[in-house]
Image (spheres, coloured by chain):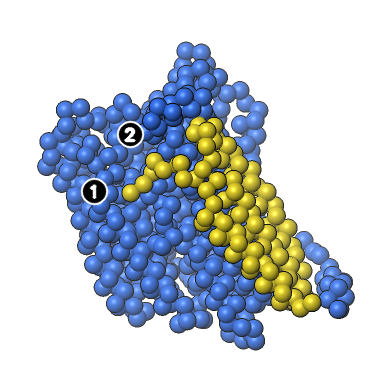
Chain colours: A blue, B yellow
């Protein structure tokens, strides 16, 4: 029993020194997290009616400053650095993913801040009493969000009750967590970042002004399943620590080449780790939360979650597979083949049967997760750059899709049932046209970003010896295109119902968000070269 | 006693927690099962810390505890809010979102 002596010896030999921080490299991350803390203080000390303008301005400012500092650093074509006690790796993919996350943060923030589509904003803290009296009467997921007297304190007398401004610190914390997640160089940092990005998202899901029961149900499901997933992630971290004696990605890779410990620990650890990561990326068979949460959460939050969480999750999956498990890829690749095929099949086939637009986009995101997995499995520079480009393209298209979905409304809130979208082109040709373009981008037609992204990922997979998988992916794309086309046909060639939904004319914020999404989708389709070059500027390092 | 026994115990606790999440109906109990899983991981971490002779695992256990505490705050807030609305914390009652 000399383990106690061992620990004493370890303590004696390592004097604890403060880790070196490359402040300029991690400045975007520090700006976002620091801005989030100040945003909490704004929430605490400002009177309620002043909070919305101040919070929106502050959150926008934080994202822009972070983007500027990121651009200033990235334009000097820096060498990859590992900083903060080797816990963060700021390399070329990290910079690309940070840029993607911050750029996607702008339209998401604009949609969350919007108060024109839903008068007063889409979020309120609680409508508990009103909804409780409704639930006995049948509970059809009612609207129960208009308890005027309960919200009155959130605005000046005479104004519409204003929104819950705690959304803005949540958005900033979630963004900061995502940025740390994609840059994490060890698994402990990755776990902490996973929680920092998840916890605000769980809460944001449950704050809808309309359809509170659905919103809260989505929050509970997302929370319980998310916590379940992160417990698996953590057990995987513990097993990998046992295998390699370290949680640093590069040391796991080194240990995999020359450790005497049982490989069972390594692959059990990897499997559990991937359960947690694939859960976040909503890859089948860990996708079951996705349709429910996408449908139940307030649409601006769904947009933020669908775009940014996907970027963060696949950024992290790509880094873990590339840095820590690149040398053992022949062992684990078969399992991921099966998962990718399952994800594409589930997304494409179940997407066909959906009657709700938001659920349909959720299943489409599961199919896209399968395509993205192809890119992350190819442990080559082309695989990395294809995945990164795909994430950028998919993120902007998705944000814009949810922006359009939030505009089609009836007296009950959003009219997301597919039958209510019949004949939408006759009511609003512009919205129907924009939606058509975005759905074609999701389907991957040429001249949209979706085509370039799919081409980049599939060609990388093909050149890394995954030809059968690429064939399956093409078939899945074709099947998925069918349900996008079904919506387009419904919008253009059906007669609108007499009591159908109206298309709200959005305010400046939502208009700007949708315009940005459409423009990027178009630009990346026509002129993909600069973004592809940026994505391919370098590989993961650790 | 061999440290391997602690690994087996923690694997057992983790499995009990995972099965509990799958079979229990009350959201609070489900959540407690998740906490059991996290604590099983802590036991694994400190055991490996001793086997490896490094302190990293023990430090990680502290991080996990802090994260678990934060998760409790958020989780109980969400469960409380849905309990107020529905007068029930059964995860089977929340069944409006399906298909």
Q: Quadrant of residue B45?
A: bottom right
Question: Dot 1: what SS?
Answer: helix
Front residue of B92/A191: it is B92
Reading the image, the residue beneath label 2 is A414
Position of A124 compared to A484: left or right? right
Tell me what residue is drawn at x 49 percent, y 48 percent: A222
Q: Position of residue B93 (x, y in %)?
A: 46, 41
Q: CA distance from mark 2 to mark 1?
A: 21 Å
Residue A187 badge: none
Is tag 2's residue or tag 1's residue first in the polypeptide sequence? 2
The answer to whether residue A68 shows anywhere in this view is no
- Above or below: residue A301 compared with residue B6: above
- Above or below: residue B23 compared with residue A455: above
Reading the image, the residue beneath label 1 is A437
Position of A217 compared to B13: left or right? left
Q: Residues within 10 Å of mark 2 (few under 14, many from 20)?
A: many
The answer to whether residue A465 shows anywhere in this view is yes
Tell me what residue is drawn at x 73 percent, y 58 percent: B62
């Amino acid at each position: 029993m000399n383990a106690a002596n061992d620990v004493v010896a370890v303590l004696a030999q390592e004097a604890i020194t403060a880790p070196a921080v490359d402040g300029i490299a991690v400045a975007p991350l520090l700006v976002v997290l620091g801005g989030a803390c100040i945003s909490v203080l704004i929430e605490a000390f400002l009177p309620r009616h002043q909070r919305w303008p101040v919070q929106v301005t502050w959150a926008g400012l934080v994202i822009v400053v972070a983007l500027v500092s990121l651009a200033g650093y990235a334009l000097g074509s820096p060498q990859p650095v590992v900083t903060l006690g080797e816990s963060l790796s700021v390399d070329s993919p990290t910079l690309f993913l940070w840029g993607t996350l911050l750029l996607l943060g702008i339209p998401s923030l604009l949609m969350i801040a919007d108060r024109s589509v839903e008068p007063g904003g889409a979020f309120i803290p609680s409508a508990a009493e009103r909804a409780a009296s409704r639930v006995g009467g049948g509970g059809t997921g009612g609207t129960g969000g208009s308890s005027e007297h309960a919200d009155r304190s959130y605005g000046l007398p005479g104004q519409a009750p204003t929104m819950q401004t705690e959304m803005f610190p949540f958005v900033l914390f979630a963004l900061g967590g995502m940025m740390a997640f994609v840059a994490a160089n060890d698994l402990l940092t990755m776990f902490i970042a996973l929680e920092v990005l998840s916890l605000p998202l769980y809460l944001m899901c449950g704050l809808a002004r309309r359809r509170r029961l659905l919103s809260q149900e989505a929050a509970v499901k997302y929370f319980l399943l998310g916590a379940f997933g992160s417990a698996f992630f953590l057990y995987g971290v513990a097993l990998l620590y046992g295998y390699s004696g370290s949680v640093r990605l590069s040391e796991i890779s080194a240990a995999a080449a020359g450790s005497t410990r049982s490989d069972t620990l390594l692959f059990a650890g990897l499997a559990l780790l991937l359960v947690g990561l694939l859960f976040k990326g909503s890859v089948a068979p860990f996708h079951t939360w996705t349709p429910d949460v996408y449908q139940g959460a307030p649409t601006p939050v769904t947009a933020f979650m669908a775009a940014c969480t996907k970027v963060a999750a696949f950024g992290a999956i790509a880094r873990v597979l590339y840095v820590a498990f690149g040398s053992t890829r022949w062992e684990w690749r078969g399992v991921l083949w099966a998962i990718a095929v399952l994800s594409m099949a589930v997304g494409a086939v179940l997407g066909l049967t959906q009657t709700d637009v938001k659920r349909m986009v959720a299943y489409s995101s599961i199919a896209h997760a399968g395509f993205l997995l192809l890119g992350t499995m190819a442990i080559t520079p082309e695989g990395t750059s294809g995945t990164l480009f795909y994430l950028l393209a998919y993120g902007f298209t998705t944000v814009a899709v949810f922006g359009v979905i939030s505009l089609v409304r009836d007296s009950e809130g959003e009219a997301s049932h597919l039958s209510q979208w019949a004949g939408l082109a006759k009511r609003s040709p512009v919205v129907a046209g924009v939606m058509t373009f975005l759905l074609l981008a999701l389907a991957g037609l040429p001249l949209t970003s979706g085509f370039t992204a799919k081409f980049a990922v599939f060609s990388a997979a093909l050149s890394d010896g995954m030809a059968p998988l690429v064939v399956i992916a093409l078939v899945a794309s074709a099947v998925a295109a069918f349900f996008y086309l079904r919506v387009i046909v419904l919008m253009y060639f059906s007669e609108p119902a007499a009591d159908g939904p109206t298309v709200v004319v959005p305010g400046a914020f939502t208009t700007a968000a949708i315009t940005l999404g459409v423009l990027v989708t178009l630009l990346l389709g026509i002129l993909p070269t600069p973004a592809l070059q940026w994505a391919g500027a370098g590989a993961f390092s650790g | 006693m061999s440290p391997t026994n602690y690994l087996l115990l923690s694997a057992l606790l983790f499995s009990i927690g995972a099965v509990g999440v799958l079979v229990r109906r009350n959201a609070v109990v489900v959540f407690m099962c998740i906490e059991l899983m996290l604590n099983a991981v802590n036991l694994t971490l400190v055991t490996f810390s001793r086997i490896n002779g490094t302190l990293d695992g023990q430090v990680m256990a502290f991080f996990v505890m802090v994260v678990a505490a934060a998760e409790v705050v958020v989780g109980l807030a969400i469960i409380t809010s849905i309990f107020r609305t529905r007068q029930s914390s059964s995860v089977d009652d929340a069944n409006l979102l399906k298909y």
